[in-house]
Image (cartoon, rainbow, N blue to C red):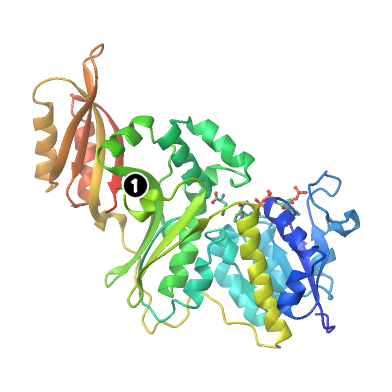
Amino acid sequence: MSQARKINVGLMGLGVVGGGVASVLLDTDQQVSAQVGMPVTLKKVLVRDSSRQRDTSVPVEMLTTDPEDLLGDPDIDMVVEVMGGIDPAARYLSRALASGKHVVTANKEVMAKHGPELFKAARQGGANLLFEASAGGGIPIIGSLMGQLLANEIRSIRSIINGTTNYILTRMAYQGAQFSNALAEAQEQGYAEADPTNDVEGYDAVYKISILASLAFHQRVPPEDVYREGISRLEPQDFRYARELGYAIKSLAIATLDPEGVGARVYPVLIPVDHMLGKVDGVYNAVEVTGSLCGQVLLHGMGAGRGPTTSAVVGDLIDIGRRIQAKEPPADAGFSGSSGRKPLPVRSMDDLHTRYYIRLNVTDQAGVLAQISRILGDLGISIASVLQKDTFPQDQTAELVITTHPSREASVQEALRLVGSLGVVNRVSNMLRIEE
Ligand code: NAP
Ligand code: HSE
């Protein structure tokens, strides 16, 4: 590392986020240097294609397509990774940390899948590793879990942490927009991942809740232990029926801790329209944390886009810069800070106990409801309400919307299998859980 009293930064990626970070670092006011208390200089920027036209003021001679220009340069003190993807990002970060370069990353996939190895490399290299932008965009949730909320036993996190999904759901709910048009708008705004399947099928939120749950519960909750459902099966009538019942539809990423274990899941839910999470619209994100001392805390803000993400990345950069300036040892970051207890098992989805919304397409004739309610009753599922919605006289079918009292997931899944096999049921059109 350079011994000079300045900090040289190597930036990996110059897209939506990298462009924002570069412009803050190149700003002639030198705000970052002033905040850190010593000069902070952008030295090299790694891209895939250095000949591409870009909307940034980064001098072309600063661009490189060779990672060695950053990783092999002993004068670069800190690497800011905003490229995305697993490979080569994880390899580059591991090497940077092991060689003592500090790292700031916005890469939730790398942190969720390879966090433990990276923390280990950071300890070996005596380097800091910060990742505030990896969940919640401009919302300072990671710093809160690693700092101000530490006095609590965190009991649950309920969050809207994918801006693209929330943007799409909001456009579908209020403007009746087609799914594909709303997604295209989110992509134009720079909210979506390189592969938007990651957003709409819930993978992005899985990585984020894996990181948040691991920090909150002081034990690793890997992405493969997070149950996931996307939003692509939602249809306009789900939004209409939900609203009639007093609910909004939101994709929530939830993590819970109880004596039996930890649970983590991402799926669209019905949530009361007047619940704070039910009112979070557009690209906004929100994270509700329930702690043993603080009670319920709700953080709300922009979850994606250049400005909010740059805010989180540069905040981390300044934080590390100040540590370097003060000659402080690296912060001992990790997913398993001491909680004084053994890691708890991950709870099976089968044991989830919640309310359900079920939409069925049935033959419009006498006795149908009796057959369905018998199956539900036999499995101990108590019906809270039944609505017969749109009827289709041309083929004598109707939509039936059933809500249940709290029931066990495994029983509901079995009931849906049995109901779906009834001759009078044409389709189990949708099943959503209800959050209160
Ligand atoms: P982006 O616009 O697609 O930009 C990616 C940048 O990385 C591009 O400049 C690209 O180079 C460069 N790059 C990608 N692969 C590379 C490789 N193998 N070698 C060298 N350069 C490479 O992505 P983004 O939206 O800025 O997102 C970056 C990261 O931030 C991701 O991890 C994302 O999940 C995270 N994030 C994004 C947001 C958001 O709102 N966009 C919010 C929070 C977190 P070229 O320009 O030459 O193609
Ligand atoms: N694609 C992500 C989102 C970017 O829409 O929330 C922020 O992580």
Q: Which residue is farthest top?
A: 394
Res 162 seen here? no
Q: Residue at x 25, y 57 (%)?
A: 351
- In what element is the residue under mark 1? strand
| Image quarter of residue 313 | bottom right
Q: Residue at x 67, y 66 (%)?
A: 314
Q: Amino acid at mark 1?
A: Val
Q: Label 1, on which residue?
A: 269
Report the front residue among 269 and 211. Answer: 269
Q: Is residue 426 left or right of residue 334?
A: left
Give residue 358's position: percent from left, percent from top: 25, 38
Figure quadrant of the N terminus: bottom right
- Vertically, is 417 above or below 272? above
Figure quadrant of the C terminus: bottom left
How many marks can you see? Answer: 1
Q: Residue at x 84, y 71 (%)?
A: 73
- Vertically, is 207 above or below 355? below
Give residue 336's position: percent from left, percent from top: 47, 77
| Image quarter of residue 125 | bottom right
Res 156 seen here? yes
Q: Is residue 217 left or right of residue 208?
A: left
Give residue 142's position: percent from left, percent from top: 52, 69
